[in-house]
């Protein structure tokens, strides 16, 4: 069994991004600029946004954070989005989800200019992805593709099973790996909570992508010998023996499944590490005008 080391890979990519920033500056251009909009005080969202801003700083990007109180009206949020759309000093921006209940997330997502939608959530980018046109890919699937590429894992003709059909992870992953080219050309099965005989599917997988949000759901009897495991899940489970009282685990029973796997991503230290890096890669592409 070999580990797909997201932490090491993210470090390598960050060094490459920092180098690119230097080159842009040497050519008289400004550093790429990512803006983030955070509405309200959701603790998890605050951590995610802080991570994104800190990652920008690490590689020499500019970043700005627009913080709005939880009771901000939808109209106000839309105004902020329009301003960022028009601001030439901002290459790309994200609106951290979830938004407070009184704000319609679909309307906000649709208001973002697809050319600045570095989260890849706008349906224009989703549609372009499905048609293999230049686009911003959502960060987690983009990170997984990057991992597959850098480790040169073969995908052509492989049986891929994706667990979970969310629009930001499972569904795009299933589209991307079934597209023509590399990484792609796989035969993909997309499973969800209504799938019958789930283990019948997972046992056929050469590559299993787990994105369901249930701690250690995938057990060794659900996979075949030599499977490649991409574990997207990030779950908190109680661990009274630890000082912080919890530990993080994936959707795969790591210790037990690792014995049968040829490659596996750890949690933490796997896919999650690449998610933020992918957002930075999208922002760099935006700054260089590579997509639109
Ligand atoms: P969602 O909660 O949006 O979707 C979960 C999916 O899993 C749904 O499609 C659901 O099916 C399916 N599902 C739930 N229970 C089962 C079951 N028993 N059998 C089969 N399928 C099931 O999840 P996300 O895609 O947003 O996230 C998934 C996990 O990945 C979470 O742990 C999350 O924290 C993590 N995550 C990690 C990221 C990273 O950077 N590493 C980024 C984003 C998420 P149905 O559609 O039928 O309800």
Image: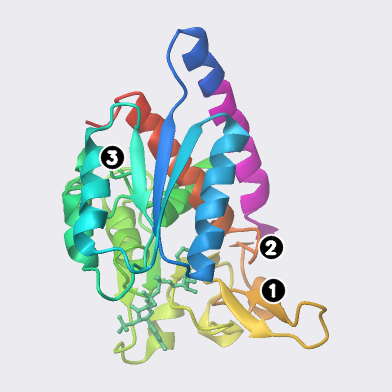
Neighbours of disc 2 within 10 Å: few (<14), some (14-19), many (20+): some
How far from the left and from the top, in percent, is residue 271? 54, 58
Instruction: Name the spot of residue 132 as percent of width and height, x first.
Output: 21, 44
Q: Quadrant of the N terminus?
A: bottom right
Q: Are marks 1 and 2 in contact (CB under 8 Å)?
A: yes
Residue 200, located in which quarter of the rendered image? bottom left
Residue 134 appears in the figure:
no
Spot occupied by residue 122 in the image (x, y as percentages of width and height): 22, 53
Q: Main secondary structure of the magenta part?
A: helix
Report crowding for label 3: few under 14, some 14 to 19, many 20 or more residues within 10 A (C-alpha).
many
Q: Residue furthest top?
A: 27
For image coordinates 67% across by 57% down, the residue present is 3
Disc with the residue nearer the chain's start (1 vs 3): 3
Q: CA distance from mark 1 to mark 2?
A: 7 Å
**In this picture, is 47 found above or below 165?**
above
Residue 126 in view (yes/no) = yes
Q: Residue at x 39, y 87 (%)?
A: 198
Q: Quadrant of ligand 1?
A: bottom left
Query: Which residue is under mark 1?
Result: 259
User: What residue does disc 2 label?
Assistant: 1
Q: Earlier in the sequence, mark 3 or mark 2?
A: 2
Mark 1 and mark 3: span between their CA atoms? 49 Å
Q: Which residue is mark 3?
A: 84
Q: Nearer the viewer, residue 201 or 245?
A: 245
Bounds of the magenta segment? 1-20
Q: Is mark 2 within 8 Å of ligand 1?
A: no
């Amino acid at each position: 069994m070999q580990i797909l080391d997201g932490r090491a890979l993210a470090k390598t990519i960050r060094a490459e991004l920092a180098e690119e920033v230097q080159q842009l500056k040497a050519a008289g251009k400004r550093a790429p600029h990512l803006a983030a909009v955070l509405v309200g005080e959701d603790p998890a969202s605050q951590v995610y946004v802080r991570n994104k801003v800190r990652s920008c700083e690490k590689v020499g990007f500019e970043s700005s954070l627009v913080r709005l109180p939880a009771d901000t009206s939808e109209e106000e949020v839309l105004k902020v989005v329009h301003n960022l759309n028009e601001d030439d000093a901002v290459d790309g921006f994200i609106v951290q989800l979830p938004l407070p209940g009184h704000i319609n997330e679909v309307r906000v997502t649709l208001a973002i200019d697809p050319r600045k939608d570095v989260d890849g959530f706008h349906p224009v980018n989703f549609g372009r992805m499905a048609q293999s046109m230049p686009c911003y890919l959502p960060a987690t699937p983009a990170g997984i593709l990057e991992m597959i590429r850098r480790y040169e894992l073969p995908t052509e003709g492989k049986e891929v099973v994706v667990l979970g059909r969310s629009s930001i992870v499972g569904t795009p992953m299933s589209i991307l790996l079934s597209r023509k080219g590399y990484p792609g050309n796989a035969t993909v099965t997309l499973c969800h909570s209504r799938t019958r005989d789930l283990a019948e599917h997972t046992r056929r997988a050469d590559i299993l992508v787990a994105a369901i949000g249930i701690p250690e759901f995938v057990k060794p009897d659900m996979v075949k010998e030599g499977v490649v495991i991409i574990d997207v899940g990030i779950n908190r489970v109680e661990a009274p023996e630890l000082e912080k009282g919890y530990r993080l685990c994936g959707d795969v029973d790591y210790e037990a499944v690792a014995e049968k796997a040829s490659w596996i991503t750890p949690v933490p230290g796997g896919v999650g590490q690449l998610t933020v890096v992918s957002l930075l890669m999208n922002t760099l592409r935006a700054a260089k005008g590579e997509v639109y």
